[in-house]
């Protein structure tokens, strides 16, 4: 049906969501009991939330308290609970209180609200590439310029401070990092993050750090020490998701942690776009947060174990670039073939669903085999190890080995 009105230029210039493309490929695969579909495309928890959380969600949904609106920044009790949890994660010196926290309808909205409060159309935001596609889509929809800070396999996909500094202009409003990274899995060190804070502070731009996957760091060390002094409030905007660690992506709860002076403006955005964050999940999860620490740690260990299995079972010609959080980023071995084409055939013919690097950078999708012109950044594939079990991880690696002959493409030397 031809519309009688036009849609906005922002939305027209925004990439299409890539996950439906992966679903389309998955649907085209003819699964059999002996050859089931193995889906490593989406970053979703592979297990349900623990029974006590499920019960609490049910009870909260039926409680009188849950029916009404609340304040845009979320319930004080849930914000206090998150502040206490942050002390557990970042150490006792973590200087974050409930007044530094606004709860959001998922972490994606935490990013959107932060960006809306920070920028005007035409401003620039620096994103390491490959990027988390919804971050770039947010910028594009809002008429902002995405400035690409390319990251490289030889650096473990860590962003370079020096390269970032060169990209800063009078129009730059923020640098937005994701650690552990989506899609590469790269985990940025505490030192690197401290250097980014210094750079951003010196240049007078915000440093957004999306730590959706921070609970999956199993080193036993805090992810960073930025919250240990109150200086973080000058520069850092931290975004967090409850979707992954607590296995409740459908309940839509996230958070922004930032200076109260910035949150004042964020709350104006939140009042407009969410009115208040979902009530049921706040009522259910807040009181349980401390008792769910073992569940979160156990889930993180299980994901880590799967990363080890994946690393050990990956055929030698498939090169692992980085691993962490939910993801492994792998270079495929086929000569002159773009990862988009590899992912398409892996999914539709071999039943292994993954996402190509083209979905995480400026898109050149739809290209068939591009003779010799396939660039290095087109060769990478994201595997999500979270939404699959240990046995299936082994099977995926067996099918990757098979694909080396089954797909009929020449292998690199
Ligand atoms: C880096 C990153 N941020 C945010 C999100 C979305 O989180 P939420 O479900 O809380 O909106 C995701 C989901 O995959 C993600 O990978």
Image (cartoon, rainbow, N blue to C red):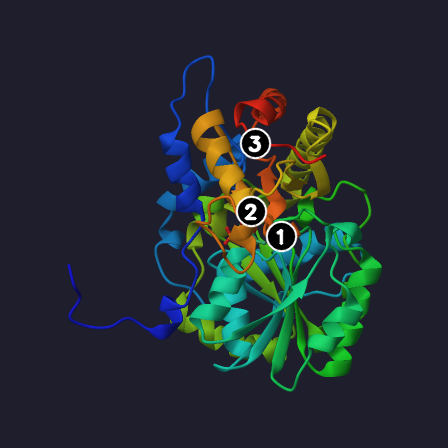
Camera-nearest residue between 76 and 41: 41
Residue lying at 43% horizontally and 55% vertically, measured from the top left: 278
Residue lying at 78% horizontally and 81% vertically, measured from the top left: 202
Ligand 1 within 8 angstroms of badge 3 C-beta: no
Residue corresponding to mark 3: 409
Q: Closer to the N terminus: mark 1 or mark 3?
A: 1
* Left or right: where 328 falls relative to 284: right
Ligand 1 within 8 angstroms of badge 1 C-beta: no
Q: Looking at the picture, how far across and down is residue 91, in whole percent? A: 80, 54
Q: Residue furthest bottom?
A: 170
Residue lying at 54% horizontally and 64% vertically, measured from the top left: 111
Up-down: is 204 above or below 81? below
Residue corresponding to mark 2: 371
Q: Which mark is residue 150?
A: none
Residue corresponding to mark 1: 375
Q: Secondary structure under badge 2?
A: loop
Q: Looking at the picture, how far across and down is residue 299, in whole percent? A: 65, 34
* Left or right: where 306 falls relative to 46: right
């Amino acid at each position: 049906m031809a519309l009688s009105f036009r849609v906005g230029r922002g939305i027209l210039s925004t990439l299409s969501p890539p996950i439906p493309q992966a679903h389309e490929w998955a649907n085209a695969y003819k699964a059999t009991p002996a050859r089931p579909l193995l889906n490593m495309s989406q970053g979703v928890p592979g297990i349900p939330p623990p029974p006590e959380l499920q019960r609490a969600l049910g009870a909260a949904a039926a409680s009188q308290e849950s029916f009404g609106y609340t304040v845009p920044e979320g319930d004080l009790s849930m914000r206090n609970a998150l502040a206490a949890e942050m002390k557990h994660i970042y150490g006792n010196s973590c200087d974050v209180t409930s007044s530094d926290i606004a709860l959001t309808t998922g972490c994606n909205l935490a990013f959107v609200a932060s960006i809306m409060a920070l920028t005007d159309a035409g401003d620039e935001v620096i994103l390491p590439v490959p990027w988390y596609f919804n971050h770039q889509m947010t910028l594009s929809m809002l008429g902002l310029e995405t400035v690409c800070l390319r990251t490289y396999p030889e650096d473990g996909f860590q962003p370079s401070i020096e390269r970032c500094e060169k990209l800063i202009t009078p129009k730059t409003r923020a640098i937005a990092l994701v650690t552990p990274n989506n899609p590469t899995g790269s985990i940025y060190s505490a030192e690197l993050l401290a250097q980014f804070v210094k750079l951003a502070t010196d240049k007078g731009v915000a440093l957004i750090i999306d730590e959706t996957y921070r609970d999956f760091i199993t080193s036993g060390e805090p992810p960073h020490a930025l919250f240990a002094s109150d200086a973080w409030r000058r520069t850092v905007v931290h975004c967090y998701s409850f979707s992954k660690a607590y296995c409740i992506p459908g309940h839509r709860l996230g958070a922004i942690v930032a200076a109260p002076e910035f949150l004042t403006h964020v709350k104006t955005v939140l009042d407009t776009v969410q009115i208040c964050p979902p009530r049921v999940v706040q009522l259910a999860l807040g009181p349980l947060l401390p008792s769910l620490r073992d569940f979160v740690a156990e889930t993180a260990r299980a994901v880590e174990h799967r990363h080890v299995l994946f690393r050990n079972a990956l055929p030698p010609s498939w090169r692992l670039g980085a691993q962490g959080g939910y993801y492994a980023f792998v270079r495929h071995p086929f000569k002159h073939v773009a990862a988009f084409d590899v992912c398409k055939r892996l999914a539709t013919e071999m039943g292994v669903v993954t996402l190509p690097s083209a979905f995480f950078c400026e898109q050149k999708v739809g290209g068939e085999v591009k003779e010799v012109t396939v660039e290095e950044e087109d060769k990478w594939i994201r595997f999500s190890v979270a939404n699959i079990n240990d046995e299936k991880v082994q099977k995926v690696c067996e099918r990757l080995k098979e694909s080396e002959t089954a797909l009929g493409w020449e292998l690199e030397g």
